[in-house]
Amino acid sequence: MAFSSGSGAGAPMADINVTPLVDVMLVLLIIFMVTAPVMSYPIDVNLPQRTTTPPPPTPPKEPVRLRVDASGQIFWNDTPQPITALQSMMEVEVQRDPSNQPMLEIDVSSDADYGILAKVLAKAKNANMEKIGFVQNE
């Protein structure tokens, strides 16, 4: 009477038989193991090749200093410039050497309007400037 779980001999069995469930799961596992390599496909990747001579280091360019004062005036390397001319000036700097761009150092007065800074950053993004830093004055 190892399999009886009821009080009498004719009582229904209260335990669930999990053997068919385990059999189905093992069959599905085998099917997925067999079909998984068939579903994968190779991807061609061009990896860089190892070289024994590294490229010569390029010296960093002189940074471009951009200052915004409290009145909203913008200075490009200590020369006052209108905000409308900034993007073309930034594009010229990027086009000189796109792989070795100069750092754009932005110095903003603590009393300056945040909208001016947002416009300057938008123009730098539109000109594809990659190196932008902020100058912190104490």
Image: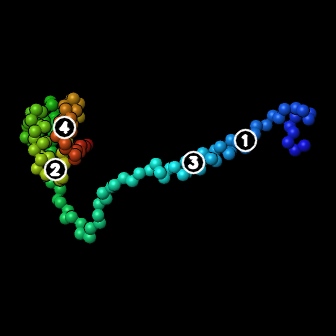
* Mark 4 crowd level (few <14, some 14–19, many ≥20, 10 Å Cα): few
Query: Looking at the picture, how far across and down is residue 30, in whole percent?
Result: 59, 50
Q: Which mark is residue 31?
A: 3
Do residues under tags 3 and 1 come within 8 Å of each other at their CB atoms? no
Q: Which mark is residue 126?
A: 4
Residue 47 can be seen, yes or no: yes
17 over 57 or under it: above or below? above
Query: Looking at the picture, how far across and down is residue 57, in whole percent?
Result: 20, 62
Query: Looking at the picture, how far across and down is residue 105, in whole percent?
Result: 19, 45
Q: Amino acid at mark 4?
A: Asn
Q: Nearer the viewer, mark 2 or mark 3?
A: 3
Q: Amino acid at mark 2?
A: Pro
User: For this view, does 97 lie left or right of residue 31?
Assistant: left
> What is the spatial separation of the Cα atoms under label 1 and label 4, in whole angstroms?
64 Å
> What is the spatial separation of the Cα atoms under label 4 and label 2, in whole angstroms?
14 Å
Q: Amino acid at mark 3?
A: Ile
The quarter of the picture where residue 17 lies is: top right
Residue sitting farthest toward the right = 8
Element at badge 4?
helix
* Mark 3 crowd level (few <14, some 14–19, many ≥20, 10 Å Cα): few
Q: Amino acid at mark 1?
A: Val
Element at badge 1?
loop
Q: Which residue is the site of mark 2? A: 98
User: For this view, does 4 lie left or right of residue 22?
Assistant: right
Q: Nearer the viewer, residue 72 or 111?
A: 72
